[in-house]
Amino acid sequence: MSLDVGYTLGEPSGVTLTQRLVELSPLPARQSKQIAQQLLHALDPRHDPTVAQSVCAALGIAPSAFPRDHRPPGFAVWSGAVEAVARIARVVPVVTLSNVSHWDEQETDVAALLAPHLRAHHPSWQLGFAKPDARAVETVARLHGREPTEMLHVGDSLDYDVRGALAAGAKAVWITSRTPSTEALRLLAKHPGRVTVVPDLTRAVEHIEQITLPSTHTIRSTTP
């Protein structure tokens, strides 16, 4: 089972590089965020020195405006999140699958924050793929000797977590306290039984316990 990190288990304690770039871009916010997620979050600048230039070109930002003075924010784990991960880990192996840039994760050791409950932490900049690219989920599944269809991914974002899981053939638990939009309902209707909607992390944990116990090896289909 894979868990999203940002806004599922906690939140950055400051402004991220992605947020700064979205503010600088003349493109609509949702579009610029999607571009930043797919480019910035899927590349390792230590191996590709052209990352900043490529991202700026895609976002319509002058290369000279790239925030090279960016200081990575810390990450604040929400109250109860570590305990929630521990409960999940008792019934099924848990890894994280997070969309995050190399710049923003430099000051955060997610595996340490959630130790000893994680099998592994998989940030997108190390995988080379960012959700909703199906290859993000597929790569994590392969790294752990599983098929994507055996995966259950939990996260707060329809655009990234749910769409990414579905694209890979996995199931998803979508954490949202909002009433799903018409767009979201259409997506869920196209994939009956593959997405469970819950209002918070606690309910997500309860759902996972319900579908995995007494067997800790088989994820059974549920109806949202």
Image (cartoon, helix red, strand yellow):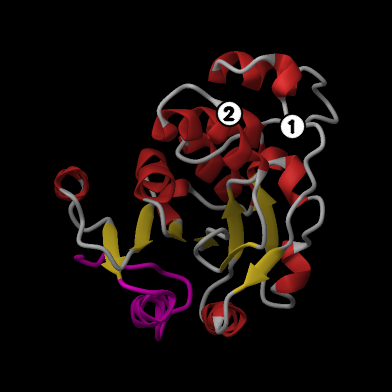
The amino acid at mark 2 is Leu
* The disc label shown at residue 67, or none: 1
Q: Compared to 172, does 187 lie above or below? A: above
The residue at which mark 2 appears reads as 24
Question: Residue 144, image x and y in percent?
Answer: 63, 54
Q: Examine the image and state in which quarter residue 150 appears.
A: bottom left
| Mark 2 surroundings within 10 Å by alpha-carbon count, few (fewer than 14), some (14 through 19), many (20 or more) | some
Residue closest to the far right: 46
Depth order, front residue of 218/11: 11
At a point 52% along the width and 78% down the height, the residue shown is 88
* Residue in the foreground of this view, choosing between 1 and 128: 128
Left or right of 100 on screen, residue 163: left
Pointers 1 and 2 in contact (C-beta within 8 Å): yes
Does residue 151 sit above or below 66 in this rendering?
A: below
Q: Is residue 192 magenta?
A: no
Magenta range is 199-224
Three-letter amino acid code at disc 1?
A: Pro
Nearer the observer, 116 or 79 = 79
Q: Check disc 1: other Cα within 10 Å, few if <14, some if 14-19, many if 20+.
A: few
Q: CA distance from mark 1 to mark 2?
A: 10 Å
Q: Nearer the viewer, residue 181 or 99?
A: 181
Q: Is residue 127 left or right of residue 33?
A: right
Nearest to N terminus: mark 1 or mark 2 = 2
Give how far across and how far down residue 14 sits, in percent: 67, 57
Q: Height in image: 20 above or below 158?
A: above
Q: Quadrant of residue 219?
A: bottom left
